[in-house]
Image (tube, grey):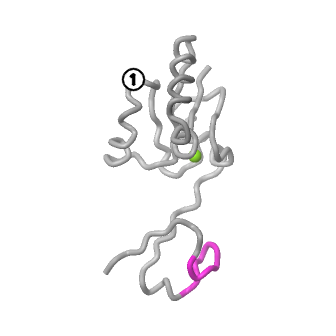
Amino acid sequence: MLIALDYDGTYTEDPELWHGFSFTARLRGHTVMVVTMRHENDSNKRELGHLAGKIDGIVYTGRNRKKDHMASLGYYPDIWIDDKPHLVFHDAVPQQIHTRKNLKSRCSACKHVFCPVKYIIKAY
Ligand SMILES: [Mg+2]
């Protein structure tokens, strides 16, 4: 079986559990890949570098729905392990970019002045 294991909020919640799981699964002939919504960049590659040798690969979907992204690469997981299973089928909500100017207005996504969506304040 090909097992797709989420990273943030799944693997990160109990790394020892998932190391043991991955070790046993691979020993039994299964393939374990980490599939994350993160972007493929140097920072993320460094952060997830500790997974080398413990899993069979890492796929960065860049906020795109996991199932379609994996299929585009020729991977069809038999099992998905994910704390947010809807992200297997749906794109992630884009991060809101707030500037000092648009902080005075309401968020276009959630209509709150200070929205609960993770945001980045651009410093000027
Ligand atoms: Mg997650």
Residue nearest the observer in this picture, 72 or 47: 47
Label 1 near ligand 1 (CB < 8 Å):
no
Q: Residue at x 42, y 80 (%)?
A: 99
- Kindly identify the amino acid type of the residue bearing the numbered disc 1: Gly
**Residue 25 screen position, x and y as percent:** 57, 18
User: Quick one: quadrant of the C terminus?
Assistant: bottom left
Q: Is residue 46 left or right of residue 121?
A: left
Image height check: is 114 above or below 63? below
Q: Which residues are magenta?
A: 105-114
Instruction: Look at 65% across and 26% down and name the residue there.
Output: 78
Q: Quadrant of residue 49?
A: top left
- Examine the structure image and report whether residue 111 is included in the region drawn in magenta: yes
Q: Quadrant of the N terminus?
A: top right
- Which SS class for mark 1? loop
Where residue 62 sits in the image (x, y, percent)? 47, 49
Horizontal relation, residue 41 to residue 22: left or right: left
Reply above or below: 9 against 73. below
Residue at screen point 49% across, 83% down:
103
Which residue is identified by label 1? 53
